[in-house]
Image (tube, grey):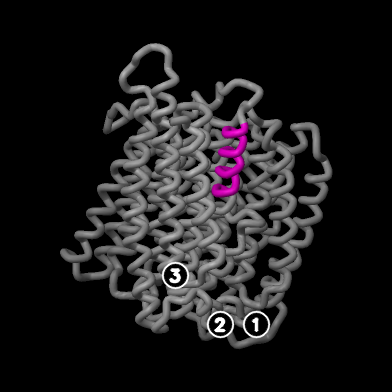
Amino acid sequence: MNALIISAVWGVLMMFSGILLKRHFLIRNLAVIGLVVLLVSDLLEMSGTVFFKMDVKGMILFDRFALFFDAIIFAATLIYFFLSAKDMEKIGVNYAEYFALIFFILCGITLVASFQSLLILFLGVEIISIPLYILTGSEKKNLKSNEASLKYLLLGAFSTAIMLMGIALIYGAVGSFMSQQITIAKTPYSALLIAGMILLLFSMAFKASIVPFHFWAPDVYDGAPTVFASFMATIVKAASFIAFIRLFNDSFGGMKPEWQMWMAVLTAATLFIGNITAVFQQSVKRMLAYSSVAQAGFMMFSLYAMNSDATEGLLLYIAAYSLATLGIFAVLNKMNDHTFDGFNGFAKSQPLVAAATAICLLSLAGIPLTGGFLSKFYMLRAAVNTGKDIWLVVFAVIMAAVSVYYYFRLIQAMYFREGNSHTVQFTQPFKWTMVAVAACVILLGIFPNLLLYWLYF
Amino acid sequence: MPVNYYIFLSLALFAIGIVGVLVRRNAIVFFMCIEIMLNAVNLLLVAFSKMHHANQAAGLANVGIDGQLFVFFIMVVAAAEVSVGLAIIVMLFRNVHSVNVNFLNRLKH
């Protein structure tokens, strides 16, 4: 509850700061302070200090899982601000408003992480989506940004309508929007309930860019300003997965036989299309967009398995994936040339940043000793523990091997090609933040319990 | 009146909306089709709300009221979405002087 209210209030505060504060670095510092306050208040709530007590009629539940996920998200956003907040100046004149919208998105994320009622799920998803449409189109004179924003808006609104239809059908079958009422629906399930669940599955798959509902993601990430594309590909994607797993764990947990096969098929399709298409991309930004689709395929394992391994693994996956992708996007944003060739000779001119980027790429590819390896391991272990569909696990391992190709292509460009990317300049704080990100990625790969410990104690 | 009538009407409206989204190429009409879909959902929610109220055995006054509450939330969110959406369409119109969705193919290559 702390984080929910503070993020909304701080969003409004950021809007006013655009009028009151004239200097950009003041606005930036205010945003960083807000995020630290959010993180601290969230951690305080984990240890039992709640500032705001409200009667929410059981529609929102701030349990350990939700609070811990919020803490990961706030930490990731803090790193995102350190790496990329300065680059938002290049996009347009409304510097403070970008931060305000990001705080509103964080408010939506706390909602979807802790909903117990489909009403809150709907509101949370919309509070995330609507500011994102604006952020995508924030480069007003750039046609690609305009187009991405319109495409995202039209398809997002369409998927929201599908989601609402699903909710309405479930309401017709059960007579309530509350998760615990939906769980105790009697077998045999009515056709209305099954149809509603499948519509909800499709719309959530759309929000999380699962194949075959992924087609918007590469276009939107490509068209959106790179700073916001990195936010969308990491933090917002993590939030849609948390909403997804909450929905299917809390509401449809009893109906697992009905949807498990759907999940298996979606997982396999996402892994296949995401990885194979990423191989053929020439632009690093588009490659990262398809790689985010492919990584979503791995996160789908948590939905397929839906046991305690899966929830732990998903949190670890979100932390490792967000860190690594934020790092690579931040470096990409500083480059003049967004193709693979733009990275030629990068290691010669910037050895420190190149090494940190290489560690992030290794983590995404799932090389041992990085967070990416262990999180993939947790996911696959969760799937193996369900005891069926071993073909899916084997297929995922093969696809992880395919993914090595396109991640290593970037490492190869940085280390083994001659080129002139030395025009790029990095500030000293940026370099050390990148090193810290790489260190965190390795730390997660060696001591995952440092993170997962917090889930229980 | 049986609730089936309402279900069929709302599904028909929803189908009209989906077909419109798939067929039409004008961004404004696209938007209107999405609004039709949302309103089909509103109709369905109100019908179900009334149905649950009529079906309950004990004469509790507020059974089924949450369905009608949901409708207000959908209206509010749809209004917010449309205000952002029209702003984006206007922004695009200023740049390309068209609201045709077929114009939107720059991202493919």
Chain letter for the residue marked with disc 3 in the picture: B
Residue A74 in view: no
Given contact means CB atoms under 8 Å apart, are the residues at marks 1 and 3 in contact? no
Q: Are marks 2 and 3 in contact (CB under 8 Å)?
A: no
Q: Which residues are magenta?
A: A191-204
Instruction: Say which residue appears at 24% left-offset and 53% top-offset.
Output: A12
Q: Is residue A219 visible?
A: yes
For the residues beneath circles 2 and 3, the answer to whether they share a chain is: no
Image side of residue A304 versus residue A58, left or right? right
The quarter of the image holding the N terminus of chain A is top left
Residues under numbered marks 2 and 1 in contact, where contact means CB atoms less than 8 Å apart: yes
Look at the numbered disc 1 and give the secondary structure of its residue.
helix
Quadrant in which residue A193 is drawn: top right
Q: Are marks 1 and 3 on the same chain?
A: no
Amino acid identity at mark 1: Asp
Chain at tag 1: A
Callout 3 amino acid? Ala
Label 3: which secondary element:
helix
* Callout 2 crowding tier (Cα within 10 Å): few <14, some 14–19, many ≥20: some
Reading the image, the residue beneath label 1 is A341
Q: Which residue is mark 2?
A: A337
Q: Nearer the viewer, mark 2 or mark 3?
A: 3
Q: Position of residue A404 (x, y in %)?
A: 74, 63
Our reading of the magenta stretch's main secondary structure is helix
Q: Is residue A199 magenta?
A: yes
Q: Position of residue A236 (x, y in %)?
A: 48, 53
Q: Which mark is residue A40?
A: none
Q: CA distance from mark 1 to mark 3?
A: 37 Å
| Residue in the image at 35% along x and 67% along y | B86
Left or right for A89, reference A147:
left
> Which label is found at residue B27?
3
